[in-house]
Image (spheres, helix red, strand yellow):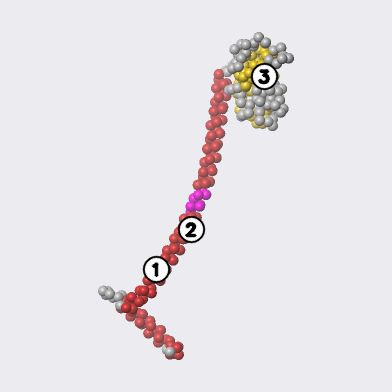
């Protein structure tokens, strides 16, 4: 048989081809039922077609899923970058809004105290502590700033200028232990010297008003302002509020502990009082 197929292989191929052609023509004709051969072929071919269809569908679906995932990852990265940009912009806008609010308060103070000639300055540095005992501002001689000029905010007296450069100046705040200014209790009109309590290793951000008369009626809640004595600081600038009144045994005067109106842990912009219009 094998020898026969080898010997007549050409004839066999032609015969099989003709048979398949005739089968295709025969099965393509409209009939009411399939032949046995058609059914047999169908039983073999249909499962193979289904398997191939499922495999092709799976591959196409996998490719589509991979492409979709890539697109999602790309979109995610783009959205993430955009969110970061918006967050930075929001932070910048928030900072500008806070700065505008602070500057508005300083402007309101300057308008209320129209007798004072002031110039705005930004804090550019401070000593290494939690408090602004001594700090630097970005205004100096070129801006008319001089030693002993008062420095204020809308919340009250900050301190005075102790050193000046061309475009910078140093400020000693009223809470620094080396600070000493003349003050007056607004209600009782008692005069005293306001000193800072912030010394190295002992800082609480308060001041003490010493040399108050023994018969002074100063009490907790009283307001303390600058007295204007000595002609260094303008009169009437708010310093702070009395939170305690004490008398030490060795002293011949009363002492008032004062909480300043200014927050000396958070300073960003200040006003330098250059002069008074009535001078």
Q: What SS does tag 1 mark? A: helix
In which quadrant is the N terminus drawn?
A: bottom left
Residue 73 magenta-drawn? yes
Q: Image quadrant of residue 198?
A: top right
In the image shown, does 17 or 119 lie closer to the viewer?
17
- Residue 15 drawn at (x, y percent): 37, 85
Q: What SS does tag 3 mark? A: strand
Q: Which mark is residue 267?
A: none
Q: Residue at x 48, y 58 (%)?
A: 66
- Residue 130 drawn at (x, y percent): 66, 30
Q: Which residues are magenta?
A: 71-78
* Residue at which label 1 appears: 50
Q: Which mark is residue 208?
A: 3
- Residue 30 drawn at (x, y percent): 27, 74
- Residue 84 drawn at (x, y percent): 54, 43
Q: Residue at x 70, y 21 (%)?
A: 179
């Amino acid at each position: 048989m094998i020898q026969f197929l080898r010997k007549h292989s050409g004839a066999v191929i032609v015969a099989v081809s003709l048979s398949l052609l005739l089968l295709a023509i025969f099965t393509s004709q409209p009939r009411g039922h399939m032949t046995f051969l058609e059914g047999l072929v169908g039983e073999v071919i249909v499962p193979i077609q289904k398997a191939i269809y499922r495999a092709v569908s799976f591959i196409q679906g996998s490719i589509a899923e991979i492409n979709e995932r890539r697109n999602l990852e790309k979109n995610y990265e783009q959205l993430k970058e955009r969110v970061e940009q918006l967050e930075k912009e929001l932070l910048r806008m928030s900072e500008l809004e806070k700065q505008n609010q602070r500057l508005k308060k300083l402007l309101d103070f300057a308008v209320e105290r129209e007798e004072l000639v002031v110039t705005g300055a930004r804090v550019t540095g401070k000593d290494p502590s939690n408090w602004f005992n001594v700090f630097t501002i970005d205004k100096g001689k070129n801006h008319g700033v001089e030693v002993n000029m008062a420095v204020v905010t809308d919340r009250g007296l900050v301190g005075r200028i102790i050193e000046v450069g061309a475009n910078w100046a140093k400020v000693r705040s009223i809470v620094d232990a080396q600070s000493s200014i003349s003050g007056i209790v607004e209600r009782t009109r008692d005069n005293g010297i306001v000193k800072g309590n912030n010394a190295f290793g002992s800082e609480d951000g308060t001041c003490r008003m010493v040399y108050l008369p023994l018969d002074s009626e100063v009490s907790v809640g009283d307001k303390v302002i600058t007295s204007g004595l000595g002609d260094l600081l303008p009169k009437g600038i708010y310093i702070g509020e009395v939170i305690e009144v004490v008398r030490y045994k060795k002293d011949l005067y009363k002492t008032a502990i004062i909480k300043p109106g200014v927050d000396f842990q958070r300073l960003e912009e200040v006003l330098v009082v250059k002069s008074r219009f009535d001078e």
